[in-house]
Amino acid sequence: MGKRLGVYEWKNVFEVAKEDLAKSVMAIRFSHTRLLRRRVRFDELSDIYMKRLGRLPVVRGPSTVPEAVLAAILDREEGRIGGGPDIDQA
């Protein structure tokens, strides 16, 4: 599992930069997030994408999750099977 860094304040960023104001650091701001009870494995995510959108996910970093995929993930989280029509039923 990746390292959970939490919320950084200026002092934390300054420490990461080893107190060098000229040093580059990267920060990612997440919004509208939700913590799931269990992880979504990549094979599960791929299956959901194929069923809902007819394509595999492209995951190169933080990205917006399509509404149909999010609905399926949340239905899975709540124990509901399905989560809306598959692409061939839409």
Image (cartoon, helix red, strand yellow):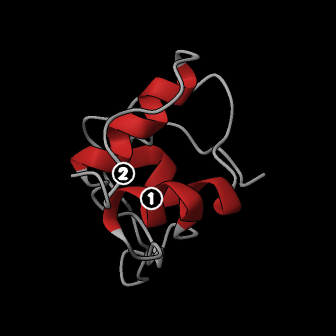
Q: What amino acid is labelled 1 in the image?
A: Lys
Q: Which residue is mark 2?
A: 86
Give the quadrant of residue 34. top left
Q: Do the numbered discs 1 and 2 sit on residues whose CB atoms are within 8 Å? A: yes
Residue 7: x %, y % from top left? 45, 37
User: Is 67 in front, or is 90?
Assistant: 90
Q: Is residue 35 visible?
A: no
Inter-mark Cα distance, 1 to 2: 5 Å
Q: Which residue is pictured at 54% across the width and 26% down the height?
A: 81
Q: Is residue 17 visible?
A: yes
Q: Which residue is pictured at 21% across the width and 52% down the height?
A: 90
Residue 53: x %, y % from top left? 32, 65
In the rendered structure, the answer to whether residue 49 lies left or right of residue 29 reads right
User: Is 76 in front, or is 17?
Assistant: 76
Q: In this picture, is 31 found above or below 76?
A: below
Give the quadrant of residue 9. top left
**Tally of numbered tags:** 2
User: Is 35 in front, or is 9?
Assistant: 35
Q: What amino acid is labelled 2 in the image?
A: Asp
In the rendered structure, the answer to whether residue 80 lies left or right of residue 68 reads right
Q: Which residue is pictured at 56% across the width and 65% down the height?
A: 46
In the rendered structure, the answer to whether residue 90 lies left or right of residue 82 reads left
Residue 67: x %, y % from top left? 23, 46
Give the quadrant of residue 72. top left
Give the number of the disc on residue 51: 1
* Residues packed near mark 2 inside 10 Å, few (<14), some (14 to 19) or many (20 plus): some
Mark 1 / mark 2, whichever is N-terminal: 1
Q: Tag 2, which secondary structure?
A: loop
Query: Residue lying furthest front in this view?
Result: 89
Q: Which residue is pictured at 68% across the width and 30% down the height?
A: 38
Q: In this picture, is 6 found above or below 1?
A: above
